[in-house]
Amino acid sequence: MLEVFFSSLLGIFEPTTLLTMLVGIAIGFAVGILPGLGGSVSLALMLPFTFYMEPVQAFAFLLGMLAASATTGDVTSVLLGVPGEATSAATVLDGYPMTRKGQAGRALAGALVGSALAGIIGAFLLAAAVPVMRPVVLALGPPEFFMLTLVGLSFVIALSGRSMVKGLIMATAGFMISMVGLDAQAGVPRYAFDQLYLWDGINLVALVVGLFGGAELLQLMLSKASIATKTATADPYAGMGQGVRETFKYWRVVLRSSLIGVGVGVIPGLGGSVSQFIAYGSARQASKHPEEFGKGSMEGVIAAGANNNAKDSGSLIPTIAFGIPGSVSMAVLLGAFIIAGLQPGPEMLTTNLDVTFSMVWITVISNVIAVVAAFLLIKQLVKLSFLRGTWLVPFLLILLSIGAFTANNNPADIAVMLVAAAFGVICIHWDWPRVPFLLAVVLGGIAERYLFLSYSLDGWTWLNDPIVLGLMAVIAFVIVGPILRAARKRRAAARAGRNDAAEVTQ
């Protein structure tokens, strides 16, 4: 097996294969920077071009594109507060505040290096995990998947700052939005108000682009200033070296986020947004300075960026091992298997093992090339954050509209984006957390489906399952932990106040 593993690396450097991969990386680089498009859109658009390619060349083209778009999706999230795709939303939370402080170079360096390291870690975990993941994933059922969705949501509610009640309210509102559209079980429209557009539910891309990017764009338009303040730092590029060093300083965050990305990516249907927010929440839980998260924490940027790349390797595992796509991008990639005449499953672990290992090396090399290219352009990209808002707003508004429109080619999605932008501004002004709302929208349909299947198959007996009970314990720890820490801080502050008062009286 080791001989095949290393011989597949040599196959990547065959001139035609290497050139095909570089073209894919270039396309993915451009697509990742454009808000709202994402890797799955680029894969779907480019899939027809693989008809006359050899299998390794086809996957070099497509996976190179996917890896590059995941890496550069963080660029607009950090610089402009606009998620490159839905799975880059967590990067906005700390990356954009750092840009507003004039630390865009530092944030981008951390996100990019974290992405590269996580991509490499994820790829080798893919190589190690493919032979053993089939029985593990098949052992999980709807109850476990339902509880995992609640674990993801509990992490985000715990990140709701000073008020977890606000986080819970926003999550409830997100669940209600997720119910708009046809009921998957009964086939009847819910909250559609006789509008055919709403039968398909609220478009997630339009919602994400508006809630984060549109809201920040409106704020920028109202301020008429640049995104970053030049008084924040004399040289915004000086932080690049610091960002690289901090990434290695927080190597535990990179490793943990990579493992979470691969672990959650393996589970079909949960998606990258869930994985990224779990990794972000985990980083905050373990941080010595959790109060900095959401205000410009380097740990938050690294956790989100690292997870964004590792999740794709995780979602490849069920796709290769038994033909179950771990994400939307992998569902599109299954088309490449069919075009290439390959059958996902045991054949990819035996007869076509060389193709499987080629995917591993393609993922590693593509991540490294994409990060190097981004570093070469980082100084030019950072300059965007110092342009006047009145110059940037028209251009960004066009990008936001394109990002919202291209998902379904429906003008109504632009209206959804604008409404979400207005809602985002209200949330910012009144200090209501947007992340629990977004993740509840993402998880609502998934949680409802798995709850329905769990009850249909086992009634309520699934609540006694050991794995389910273990996940319940995780949820309790995630929710109760911040409450206990806050109580300890209040007691410590009260003791300090009493001691100070005693000293004054003496």
Image (tube, rainbow, N blue to C red):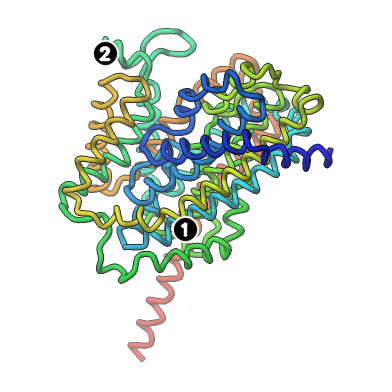
In this rendering, is residue 120 above or below 228? above
- The residue beneath circle 2 is 193
For the view shown, which residue lies furthest in the top direction? 187
Rendered location of residue 275, percent (x, y): 54, 40
Q: Which label belongs to residue 109?
A: 1
Q: Is residue 345 visible?
A: yes
Query: Residues under labels 1 and 2: Cα distance?
Result: 47 Å
Q: Residue at x 22, y 37 (%)?
A: 422
Q: Nearer the viewer, mark 1 or mark 2?
A: 1
Splitting the image into 4 quarters, where does residue 102 fall? Answer: bottom left
Q: Is residue 263 visible?
A: no
Splitting the image into 4 quarters, where does residue 312 fall? Answer: top right
Q: Is residue 268 left or right of residue 425?
A: right
For the view shown, which residue lies furthest in the bottom direction? 506
Pick the residue in front: 429 or 258. Answer: 258
Splitting the image into 4 quarters, where does residue 251 fall? Answer: bottom right
Rendered location of residue 20, percent (x, y): 57, 34
Pick the residue in front: 288 or 340. Answer: 340
Q: Residue at x 35, y 55 (%)?
A: 380
